[in-house]
Image (cartoon, rainbow, N blue to C red):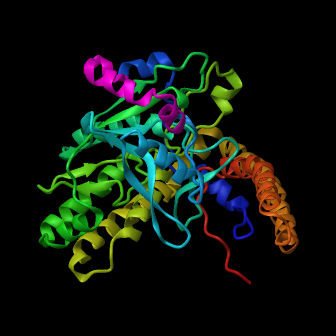
Amino acid sequence: MNEISPPTFKDFFRSFYYENTYLPRVDLSDKALSEHLLEKVDKPGAEIVQRLMSNPEVQKVFSEPLSYDLEKEIPEKNEILKRHGFDLLCTRKNQQGEVTPYYDIVEHPHFQGRLIKSGAARVPEGQLHMGPCNQQMEVTFYQKEESLLRIALANRIREVAKKLNIDVVVPEEKLVAYANVDGITDLTRKYCLVCEKIEVLSVDDTIEYIASMDEQHQRELAKNISKIAQEVGLVDASFRCIRLTPEGKLAFIDTEPAVMMIAEPKNPSLWNRVFGPKGASVQKCARIGLFTFLTQIPLDDRLKNFRSEVIKHYHETYVNTLNISYWKIVKLTVLSAGLIHLIYAISALVYLRFAKKEYEISKKMDDSFDSEGPALTSKSVEERQRKVKEYKEKRTPHVKRFYEYIEGVPYTLPPVA
């Protein structure tokens, strides 16, 4: 965290006057998830998937937390799935920029026409994986249940698109439970997802299709994407997730909410219900999503109308969600005799103090680890890995709490002296 600093008192205080909408937590209990089981609409298909995925080797690969070890663990898991007849549909790039197959989305000759996606934990225990962010220091983090929350976000996209009267394609996703789950309570180890396979253009072909449109159609498409991103709170508004079909229809093919939606904790206490994690606001996610989308539009003159329309909605999002209404401040002053502003000021001081404390602890850990860097080079690979793991495990809870305290507090870093 050496490259950032906490928000100021002013940043915290102003944030209480911004518009922030938080979605209800999503019930991911077995009972709730049973409503989305494939067997309810296609029992023979569910039986095929269950048989394929419940092979002990395959189930182990697909139910363990997703790996990011491109050197060893990922190739090993890839080989296990290929040995059992699965085709790997995803890729990742290593540090050298080389493309490596990745095992989290597969298909099988015995179950054609649909994809099988991992329902495993998106983030290994004790780790933080940063999601999309923007230039206002607003950050999202992927959470453990991202894969299972895809269904809820897909439904939200459909509902918003229908309300806005925008024609979209969102693949249907269902759950299949593994056969061998006796004694397993972790939901991310009990289910895989089956996704309708739809024909979409590649990222490059999608961009080329947009470039071939006339000004009116470019602006209309940009407006539709922007409006859905704003209303839904679509964090990952990228061409990886947003494509066109060969017929030119707008398609949303991946729907991880990246902490806008969070799971309802099991047996939550009253304290946790009131003060527990609430995820990221719809407005924050919309700001990040449109910023992300803008960075992906090539600086191609043929896309200037598409780009300018997205820019228009991007600025509109900031104005609508971060513009303080002084009439609202006057009204609150009159109605509460100024008490509400005093409460906001005290709250801002408390949050600032907590955020600074976590920031300073994390920074001290970073500095200490950096100072050990030269000495670590002489250690064995195993020793270096152990030290890095230990450092991350100790640092993670403090970084997590820091970002929880500054949730809904967009700010710009002061200039470097």
- Please tell me which residue lies in front, 146 or 103: 103
Find residue 257 and report its horizontal and vertical position in percent.
Answer: 46, 44
The magenta span reads 36-62
* Foreground pick, 400 / 347: 400
Q: How many labels does the image show?
A: 0
Dividing the picture into quarters, in which one does residue 381 lie? bottom right
Residue at screen point 57% across, 37% down: 64
Residue nearer the viewer, 345 or 70? 70
Image quarter hosting the N terminus: bottom right
Is residue 28 placed above or below 150 in the rendered structure?
above
Residue extending furthest front? 83
Residue at image coords 61%, 22%: 266
Magenta stretch encompasses residue 45: yes
The location of residue 255, given as percent across then percent down, is 39, 44
Quarter occupied by the C terminus:
bottom right
Residue 365: x %, y % from top left: 84, 60
